[in-house]
Image (cartoon, rainbow, N blue to C red):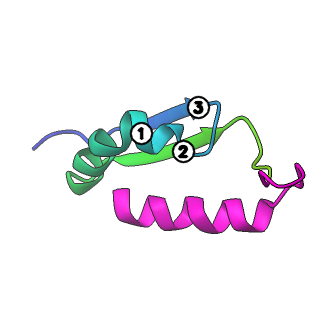
């Protein structure tokens, strides 16, 4: 049996972990490994530069459910 590991992704933008590590994250999580994401920037609306933390969190949580 393979020892379970913990993985951390550190990305600049909210979608970078999905684009750069999404497939690996999915496969690793299906094997029982833990995946954590650290996003260093915030989301701004394209129309006016207003922060929308609630929307960012919602989209990030939805993506993580899909990827594991």
Quarter of the view holding residue 50: bottom right
Indicate which disc residue 11 carries: 3
How crowded pointer 3 is (Cα within 10 Å; few <14, some 14-19, many 20+) is rated as some
In the image, the segment drawn in magenta is: 45-68
On-image quarter of the N terminus = top left
Distance from disc 3 to disc 1, alpha carbons, whole Å, reads 10 Å
Distance from disc 2 to disc 3, alpha carbons, whole Å, reads 8 Å
In the displayed structure, would residue 1 be above or below residue 66? above
Extreme residue toward the left, this view: 1
Residue 47 in picture, x, y percent from top left: 83, 55
| Residue indicated by mark 1 | 19
Q: Earlier in the sequence, mark 3 or mark 1?
A: 3
Quarter of the view holding residue 28: top left
Looking at the image, residue 30 sits to the left or right of residue 52; the answer is left
| Residue indicated by mark 2 | 15
How crowded pointer 1 is (Cα within 10 Å; few <14, some 14-19, many 20+) is rated as few
Residue 14 in picture, x, y percent from top left: 61, 45
At mark 3, the secondary structure is: strand
Q: Are marks 2 and 1 in contact (CB under 8 Å)?
A: yes
Residue 54 shown in magenta: yes
Residue 48 or 18: which is nearer the viewer?
Answer: 48
At mark 1, the secondary structure is: helix
Looking at the image, residue 40 sits to the left or right of residue 18; the answer is right
């Amino acid at each position: 049996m393979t020892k379970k590991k913990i993985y951390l992704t550190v990305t600049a933008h909210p979608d970078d972990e999905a684009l750069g590590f999404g497939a690996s994250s999915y496969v690793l999580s299906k094997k029982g490994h833990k995946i954590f994401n650290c996003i260093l920037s915030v989301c701004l609306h394209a129309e006016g530069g207003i922060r929308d933390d609630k929307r960012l969190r919602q989209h990030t949580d939805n993506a993580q459910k899909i990827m594991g």
